[in-house]
């Protein structure tokens, strides 16, 4: 049987995976990755993220990126582990959609998802650049103790340059209207949200609120744009080595207290 937090996360995840056709069409019109010849498999799907097998309500953290990247086919060819885990994620989502909801299909999807993320996440440049130091070094946590999501649930082409950045902002707002962050927060009730999107900070213009009826997590947002001259700086332009340890101490306090101050 799933735990309460697993059951709530699965309800949230199903809404994303089984998203309305109207939303999928809107994503594609706004620059989201489209399926077809020459494209990476899985662009027809939508991605809820990941719930670690050791995640605990009230003491877990939610790590948040902007949008999934549609990597060129040649990129998958250079990393067989990423290619294999990507296939597992695609197959797992499609199998769940075909089977529909049941205790057996829910459990199978969650296990397949976890196995793929556990193997792939440490290899992601985004994890290594933006989250690993915070989670592993400052919080002394494992990637199995976190949840992961992106603000946009579709993919955007990795090689679009300026067009990708424009699409990213549009897709983020579009997906936040369909799948607002507060719904995931309500499902998993984290102690803290770590979001590598500066515009998603409280009071920013991308996320209406990170609070839900039963959760008010601490939220730490920073500049996560790779190659930016202020990458990993907080809203005050401080470097990760400055603000990261402070954030970790506040998160640890919230975990000990069992609530967010």
Image (cartoon, rainbow, N blue to C red):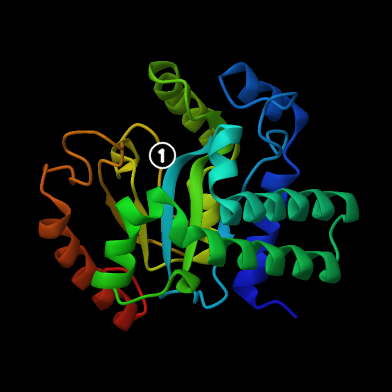
Q: Reply above or below: 127 against 233.
A: below
**Residue 213 visible in image:** no
Relative image position of residue 40 (x, y in whole percent): 66, 34
Relative image position of residue 252 (x, y in whole percent): 27, 76
The one nearer the camera, 158 or 149, is: 158
Relative image position of residue 155 (x, y in whole percent): 57, 34
Q: Is residue 246 left or right of residue 255?
A: left
Element under disc 1: loop
- Per the image, the residue denoted by label 1 is 207
Q: Residues within 10 Å of mark 1 (few under 14, many from 20)?
A: some
Query: Which residue is situated farthest in the front direction here?
Result: 78
Tell me the quarter of the picture where residue 230 sits.
top left
Residue lying at 15% horizontally and 65% vertically, measured from the top left:
246
Which quadrant: the C terminus? bottom left
Which quadrant: the N terminus? bottom right
Tell me the quarter of the picture where residue 104 sits.
bottom right
Q: Reply above or below: 127 against 260.
A: above
Q: Is residue 27 left or right of residue 144?
A: right
Residue lying at 28% horizontally and 63% vertically, measured from the top left:
134
Q: Is residue 208 left or right of residue 96?
A: left
Q: Reply above or below: 205 against 52.
A: above
């Amino acid at each position: 049987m799933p735990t309460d937090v697993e059951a709530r996360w699965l309800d949230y995840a199903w809404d994303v995976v089984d998203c309305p056709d109207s939303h999928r069409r809107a994503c594609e019109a706004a620059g989201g990755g489209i399926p077809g010849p020459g494209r990476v498999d899985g662009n027809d799907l939508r991605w809820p993220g990941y719930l670690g097998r050791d995640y605990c309500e009230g003491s877990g953290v939610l790590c948040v990126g902007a949008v999934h990247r549609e990597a060129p086919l040649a990129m998958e060819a250079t990393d067989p582990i990423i290619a294999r885990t990507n296939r597992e994620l695609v197959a797992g989502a499609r199998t769940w959609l075909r089977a529909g909801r049941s205790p057996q299909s829910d459990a199978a999807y969650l296990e397949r998802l976890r196995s793929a993320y556990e193997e792939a996440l440490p290899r992601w440049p985004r994890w290594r650049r933006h989250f690993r130091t915070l989670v592993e070094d400052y919080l002394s946590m494992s990637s199995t103790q976190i949840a992961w999501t992106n603000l946009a649930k579709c993919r955007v082409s990795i090689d679009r340059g300026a067009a990708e950045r424009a699409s990213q902002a549009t897709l983020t707002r579009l997906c936040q209207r369909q799948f607002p962050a507060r719904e995931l927060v309500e499902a998993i009730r984290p102690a803290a949200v770590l979001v590598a999107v500066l515009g998603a900070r409280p009071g920013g213009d991308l996320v209406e609120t990170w609070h839900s009826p039963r959760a008010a997590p601490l939220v730490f947002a920073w500049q996560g744009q790779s190659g930016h001259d202020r990458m990993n700086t907080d809203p005050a332009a401080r470097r990760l080595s400055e603000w990261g340890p402070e954030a970790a101490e506040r998160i640890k306090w919230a975990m000990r207290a069992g609530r967010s101050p």
